[in-house]
Image (tube, coloured by chain):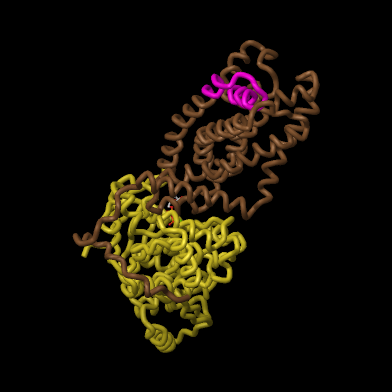
Chain colours: A brown, B yellow
Amino acid sequence: MTLDRTAPARPAVTTDPGVPAPSRRVSPTQWASQSLTMAWRSIVQIKHNPSELLDLSIQPIMFVLLFTFVFGGAIGGSTDAYLQFSLGGLIAQNALFLTIYTATGLATDLQKGTFDRFRSLPIARSAPLSGRILGDVLRQLWSLVVLLAVGVLLGFRITTSPVAVLAAFGLLVAFTLAFSWTSVLLGVLARDPEKVQIYGFTVLFPLTFASNAFAPTETMPGWLQAWVSINPVTRMADALRGLLVGGPVAANAIATLLWGVAFAAVFGPLAVWALRTRT
Amino acid sequence: MPPAIEADGLVKRFGATTALAGASFSATEGTVLGVLGPNGAGKTTATRVLATLLAPDEGRGLVGGFDVVTEPHRVRTLIGLTGQYAGVDEALTGTENLVLIARLLGQRRAAAKMRAAELLAQFGLTDAAGRAARTYSGGMRRRLDLAASLVGRPRILFLDEPTTGLDPASRNELWDMVRGLTDDGVTVLLTTQYLEEADQLADDIVVIDRGTVVARGTPLDLKSRAGAAVLQMRPTQPEQLEAVRAVAAELAGAEPTVEQGTVSVPAADDALMPAVVRRLDDVGVSLAELTLRRATLDEVFLALTGHRAIEADPTDDLQESA
Ligand SMILES: Nc1ncnc2c1ncn2[C@@H]1O[C@H](COP(=O)(O)OP(=O)(O)OP(=O)(O)O)[C@@H](O)[C@H]1O
Ligand SMILES: [Mg+2]
């Protein structure tokens, strides 16, 4: 092993007045570039392990098949009619489950020394978090494409415009970017990737099933309806239905985005705080 | 010149555990400071505090003249860290791991790639550059980890047990690398559980135990105080144990330990063994066994602190090499 002795000598670390002091903090452009670099890392991870995309596809496909052919007739009268109703819900539910990847990835970094390395670098404190969330958008887009494709194969008809479909993509990405902060907090608190899975499902199952993702709100008991009608999963499912097969969009989309803002405003600072005070 | 690294009365508690109980030490620019201590002594905690990863409960840490608590970002622009647990991303290739760090440090893509190639060559990883770090051996991973901490050409480098899990050849290579860095003026804080490693590399050593510094000095200082080698004697007749102990105590000038029919005493210089042999011969004691061996960390501790090192936790090392 030889050493790089030709490297230009850097100024000594002493407080020599001739040496410019190193910068005190990170600028917004640096933060953006650091987050993008972190996102690049997530993408490279998938590139090296493409079978992960298969894992990402199997569960949603099973859900589509299960709900369409097993429950569809009973809930929606016919499998065809039910698919038109349920696909928006399935997409919303799947998007929430995917955010768990953010937590498991983070917990893995924390468990190994990877996160310590990042924290020893002169980069923005939040860049490893925001970068990971950003990188996980790719997973969201992939799943969305898979779900739409499978849906169409089974007879789902998009009755709106390409612009509306793009808007559906945009809404989904915007909400999950914000919602991912809950997952970041989970990853920091759980510390262990396996615990993340358990906690994550414990929270997400009631959240996603106590919604109108799979069954219309009117069929539920009154006390449940009260919650279901404000549940962010319900609002996003309705907005996606509106954007894909027609129906009211604006109120639902706004509610979804407001929920996203609320999640980010509460869980973002909590996550950063949990990471700071973590020992 | 102010020290490059200065710890002043660092205290860190984790619940009921006091990991650091007022540790103070410093490292002069361009030198290697060896922090020697057994499992649980507080080495990693001290490193993490100085590398801005952990805020101390009390005391102050200065790195490159900057306070680690009030000016962490400035400290981070000066340091490199190779933690006890590997910081490489196993899913990424060697090149990608280094490019990631270089890009985070603000280097352009081309410059980042060049820096990565340069470091991979220095660490003998060029052939493995395009392979996922998952497929690396423990030693290769350790080297990549070290390379990652050097991407930004840090002036101050923290190495937490860098040779744990390395074979002797890789360990020697790493030692050479550390020597080369200090030749270039880099200050290194290196923690280790091995006296030999501290002896090989460090200009100064602090021995820490239960969160406090129990001894400090140059390797030579500490060796002469603790005995780098241990002379071990077993008399043919167990009744003569006491006679052997008395001779050893007198000639070595230190209190021997007697265990299982064997007398052990620190051997500060090479003349001790022949002197002991002569004297025992004179008084008519014959030895069944006479060995001069390297002092274990436990014996150094016993000599320096008067108590044994805390029981080592063997699972720690197993995890490291896994
Ligand atoms: N995050 C933590 N939470 C609780 N206790 C901790 C934590 N980190 C360290 N400790 C405790 O603090 C003490 C010092 O630990 P530290 O890791 O600094 O020791 P060390 O000298 O690095 O040991 P080793 O040689 O095993 O790496 C130990 O008793 C350890 O159990
Ligand atoms: Mg340690």
Q: Position of residue B114 (x, y in %)?
A: 46, 66
Q: Is residue B298 magenta?
A: no
In the image shown, does A263 or B171 lie closer to the viewer?
A263
Q: Looking at the image, how many numbered discs can be counted on the residues?
A: 0
Report the residue at 27% width, 54% height from top: B66
| Residue A167 in sight here | yes
**Horizontal side, residue B128 vs residue B304: left or right:** right
Residue range corresponding to the magenta coloring: A234-255
Q: Position of residue A264 (x, y in %)?
A: 47, 32
| Residue B308 in sight here | no
Most common secondary structure along the magenta stretch: helix
Q: Position of residue A56 (x, y in %)?
A: 67, 42
Q: Is residue A246 magenta?
A: yes
Report the residue at 39% width, 48% height from top: A30
**Horizontal side, residue A223 vs residue B53: left or right:** right
In the image shown, does A34 or A124 lie closer to the viewer?
A34
In the image shown, does B29 or A97 lie closer to the viewer?
A97
Q: Is residue B134 above or below residue B248?
A: above
Q: Residue furthest top?
A: A222
Q: Quadrant of the C terminus of chain A?
A: top left
Q: Residue furthest left?
A: A17
Report the residue at 59% width, 35% height from top: A200
